[in-house]
Amino acid sequence: MPDEPPVLTAVSSSARQLFTLLRCIAFASKAHVQLSHEGLKFSVDEASVMEASAFLDKSLFTTYSFHAPPVPPPSADSDDEEATPPLTFHISLAALLETLQIFGLTDPDASRPPWARDNPYPTSTAFSNNVLGMNNLCRITYDAPGAPLSVILTEASIRTSCDLTTYQPEYTDEIPFDRQSLAFKTIMRGSWLHDAILELSSTSPEKLTMYARMVRGKPLFALSSTGTLGSARVEFNNQPPKSTLRPTAAKPDEANTPPVNLLETFQLSDPDTVLRASYKYSLIQKAARAMSVATKVSVRVDMQGVLSMQFMIEVEAAAGGGSSQVSFVDFRFVPLVDDEDEGGDEGETLMQNGEGDDSHDAF
Amino acid sequence: MVVLNFTLTPEAASKVHDLLVCLGKFSETVAIEARRERFTFTALNSSKSAYCAVTLDGKQFFRQYECIPDAGGTDGRFSCSMYTRALLSVFKGRLYDPLGRDGAVERCEVSLQDQDNEAYCRFIIKMVCNQGVTKTYKLTYEAVDVMHALFDRSVAQNRWSMHSGATREYIEYFGTKTELLDIFTGEDGRCVFKSYTEKISDGKEILKHPLVTAVAVNTSDFEYFNVQAGLHIVISVKDFKAIVLHADTLKTSLKAYYSQPTRPLQFSYGCDGLVAEFTLMTSGDYTGAPPTPTPAPQQHTATPQQSRQASHSPSAASERTDMRSMRSEMPPPVQPASRRDQNGRLRNPGSRQPSSAPSQSQTVPPQAEPEDEESLFVPHNDTRMQEEEDAAWAPMDYDKEETLGWDASADHDAAVFPTFRDSGSMSRTTTTDSNMVIEPTQRLSEITGLW
């Protein structure tokens, strides 16, 4: 047993990257961790109606070595399909996040000046700790199944080690999402989606409804909600209005490149109908943090109405330069079932052709 | 069917945000009144002591404005009320982004959905942003009739005007727990803004009275100043702060119009098609030192105050007086000559004081008001006698009730001063007794038949 190499040894030069990614899914206290050759996957779920996962690819780490433990022959654990079953356990996500923050340097937003925060594009490394000359190492070790997950953070001459207890995994079924039969797909900037969710929160809604359709050949994507004070709706369309008021204080390069479409990709399985799907607003709001740090988000709805949001997050470059890494955080939501007289709200009539036939609501 | 629609530029939309923030400090609902050529936001606070109206000119403030009310001809109007919170969630701060970054609003289109074929009536606000994003809000509203406060500027002879930036600096000095603001014009060319509160905080606080702050401004610093000297007028500090902060967002001059304490006061300012008018109730109930002896430095400020302050009765007495005079304002038929307020002036018999105004002022301008010859009292024209009389009214002694008066009401705290009750026909005797000695005209022995 002592001769066995540890199951996982991973060294990262920036606890901050890990922290940023894990914070996106930090709405639950316990996370399901899955170790494999490709990297670490952290997943959380909420009452089986929503689940989120963050995948830390091995390229995020400067060193990553994974040795699958020997599979005990007839064991109840290994009911997985692959030859090397991925190792899974439960861990307290809150404790892990606290650990990663232990030096207080992991939130990049705090260390950047106000005008450089929340920038979707990778910021210059002038502000990162590496250039400032601080040694920052984060080493994650998992010795054997059942051992605690050991996180050792080193900064200059200070070394902190934390052992986080690992628990038996609780298996829950994944929310089924059929990638092959999509009803709708679009890719847009994460900040727009974040902004829209914030706008809709002003009505304190219970439910958020998503609409997608083609209008005269142009895509239209809208989010709407209804609350006690009225209703709100944010529409995205690809026709950039001519800026009549003022010319944008253009950055020099923008003048030459064509304007980027708001909705970069837009696919509707059935272009003639309006796609309408409703979700619980409070669940969607839990993805707000991921929306705010993501560069791009891919929004997909399958034939059953399950919503999948995949956020592409660019974290800063690892130590010693190199390009910034891209990581993915996934969210899945189970849709709300439409009531008969749901009729969406008055928002229907705004779909530019006034197709709102059912304008009666439960009021 | 009402037609109402208009378009705002982002700068105008952020001005709407500022004015909504200001109106939100007065009331949680704001009323909207739309006429053919202008649009007004009004708010009335819960105690009905402050009325705010911000009027936006149809041609100047809006990029496009159209309103066709369904009734009333040329003076027709459409009015409704909404929650300020709802409007504020739509008109957020930082709407006006001069850099035109992503998410900046290009224009704001507002319209009213009030047609018969629609299931709902909604106030629709559409923010068109750059990059193809459109945000639409549909807010519920309640149709109401808007109440307006009347203010007659021709009566308000006291006026001043000051740049809002300067007043903004002064309000920084007012204590946070103070409630009232006394604007006092001295005779020495200074105007004093004094914030204080009458309430004595009980409990564990060290200072029983919150800090009293007085800011003295030379009248020459005002853009225009024409106020009767010696006049104290008291308004609410919170209202004043809200007004000044909003005026400062426009960087314009703040004008004040008032006549005398307990009559309404109006602040007005505006620019670029926006005119704001705030009508506030005032009192002149200026209290000096509190009843318990507190160290003088805490109360008196460095600025020269009128010496009246020393002569004022302690606040407890004045509070009782206030309550009485307030009660006596109520409609019962006016007693002709016996009704005099404590300042010795004959109060205007029919005057309807605003019901929320606390009291008749104790302060009297040093110039003598013309006295009414009808009064049976010896006219008191000079200040010294006035002070004496005031002092005479201020006995704090509950033990020896020197009163002979008879008070029909059951209010025991009016015991000391029955004078102001309508039923106080005995009062005259008491008064004259305390002021001058009248010799009996008959000796007791000469009276027969009485007993």
Image (spheres, rainbow, N blue to C red):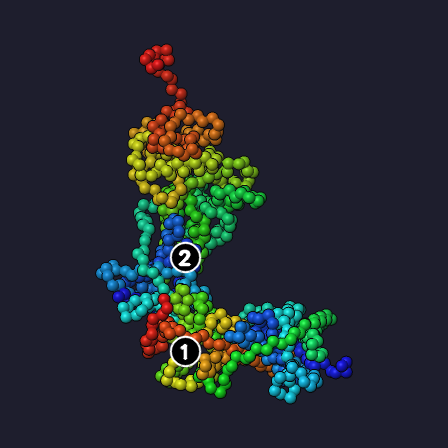
Is A235 on the left or on the right of A41, as rendered? Answer: left
Label 1: chain?
Answer: A
Q: Quadrant of residue B449?
A: top left
Residue B304 at what x, y percent from top left?
49, 40
Q: Nearer the viewer, residue B405 or A225?
A: A225
Q: Which residue is mark 2?
A: B28
Residue B263 at what x, y percent from top left?
36, 44
Residue A214 appears in view: yes
As helix, strand or loop, the secondary structure at mark 2 comes to loop
Q: Residues within 10 Å of mark 1 (few under 14, many from 20)?
A: some
Residue occupying image coordinates x 59% and y 68%:
A110
Q: In this figure, what is the number of numbered marks?
A: 2
Please tell me whether residue B237 is drawn above or below residue B403 in the rendered image. Answer: below
Q: Which of the numbered marks, if any, corresponds to residue A276?
A: 1
Q: Quadrant of the C terminus of chain B?
A: top left
Is B299 on the left or on the right of A163, as rendered? Answer: left
Residue occupying image coordinates x 46% and y 39%:
B287
What amino acid is labelled 2 in the image?
Glu
The span from disc 2 to disc 1 (Cα, nearest Å) is 35 Å
Please tell me whether residue B165 is drawn above or below residue A220 in the rendered image. Answer: above
What amino acid is labelled 1 in the image?
Arg
